[in-house]
Amino acid sequence: MLLPNIAGIDGQKPYANCYLCWNNDGVYFGVEVNNKTNYNLSPSDPTKGDCVQLFIDTRDVKTQRANRYCHRFYFLPGGIGKTTKTPFGRQIAINNAQEQSPPCSEDSIKARVRILKKSYQMEVKLPANGLNGFNPREFSRIGFTYLINDTEHGIQSWSAIPDMGVEHSPSTWGTAELFKNSK
């Protein structure tokens, strides 16, 4: 499902289209970043270069400090070393958390990227067993946001910007309702 683009509410011009869906196997995120020709990847400090960050709270309780149900992931639109065409991503700690979520195995995270002439498309699957507390039957909402850091276009977010504490405060994340497909 195409996520509504709320960046335009405060006058920002969006440069990416983002998609979110789910099933019992996990959460899926897709992004297409438009008008992109130069890439700056910084694996040691991903927010200093081009990256996509995903934030998920499997209980959506909107606390000020993250807890064991809160997750932060980042993905680079290219790899490092010999695998430069494979996106690189992993779960990272949330600063100032009351408690960190158990780590999601890097091998279980699936991602792929397609670099085009003037854009890139990335798809990510975060497995259910890597999202502590993910149980759509009992909790039909998740706290969610993304931050796209782009060295050409700046930051695009779904709910709040880093200055508002989005990187560590689930209270700034939006809510995604997990509707079951009736077909």
Image (tube, helix red, strand yellow):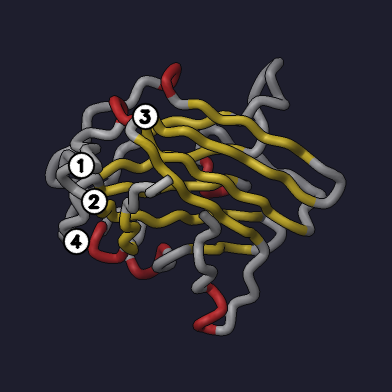
Instruction: Please state which amino acid type lies under the numbered disc 4.
Output: Lys
Q: Position of residue 91 (x, y in %)?
A: 38, 33
Q: Quadrant of the C terminus?
A: top left
At label 1, the amino acid type is Arg
Q: Residue at x 24, y 45 (%)?
A: 58
- Between the residue at mark 2 and the residue at mark 1, the CA separation in whole angstroms equals 6 Å
In the picture, measured across the screen, residue 99 lies left or right of residue 181, that is left
Would you say 76 lies left or right of 20 here?
Answer: right
Mark 2 near mark 1, Cβ–Cβ under 8 Å?
Answer: yes
Marks 1 and 3: in contact by CB < 8 Å? no
Question: Disc 4 vs disc 3: which is toward the camera?
Answer: 3
Q: Residues within 10 Å of mark 4 (few under 14, many from 20)?
A: some
Amino acid type shown at disc 3: Asp
Q: Which residue is mark 2?
A: 140
- Tell me the residue that label 1 is attached to: 137
Query: Secondary structure beneath disc 1?
Result: loop
Q: Quick one: label 4 or label 1, which is nearer the N terminus?
A: 4
Q: Is residue 178 above or below residue 104?
A: below
Answer above or below: position of 48 versus 171.
Answer: above
**Residue that carries the numbered disc 4 in the rendered image:** 62
Other-residue count near label 2 (Cα within 10 Å), few / some / many at <14 / 14–19 / ≥20: some
Mark closer to the chain start, 4 or 3: 3
Q: Secondary structure at mark 2?
A: loop
The residue tagged 3 is: 25
Q: Earlier in the sequence, mark 4 or mark 2?
A: 4
Q: Secondary structure at mark 4?
A: loop
Q: Nearer the viewer, mark 4 or mark 2?
A: 2
| Disc 3: CA contacts within 10 A as few (<14), some (14-19) or many (>=20) | few
Q: CA distance from mark 3 to mark 1?
A: 12 Å
Marks 2/3: CA–CA distance: 15 Å
Q: Residue at (33%, 33%) from the top-left corner?
A: 24
Q: Position of residue 130 (x, y in %)?
A: 31, 28
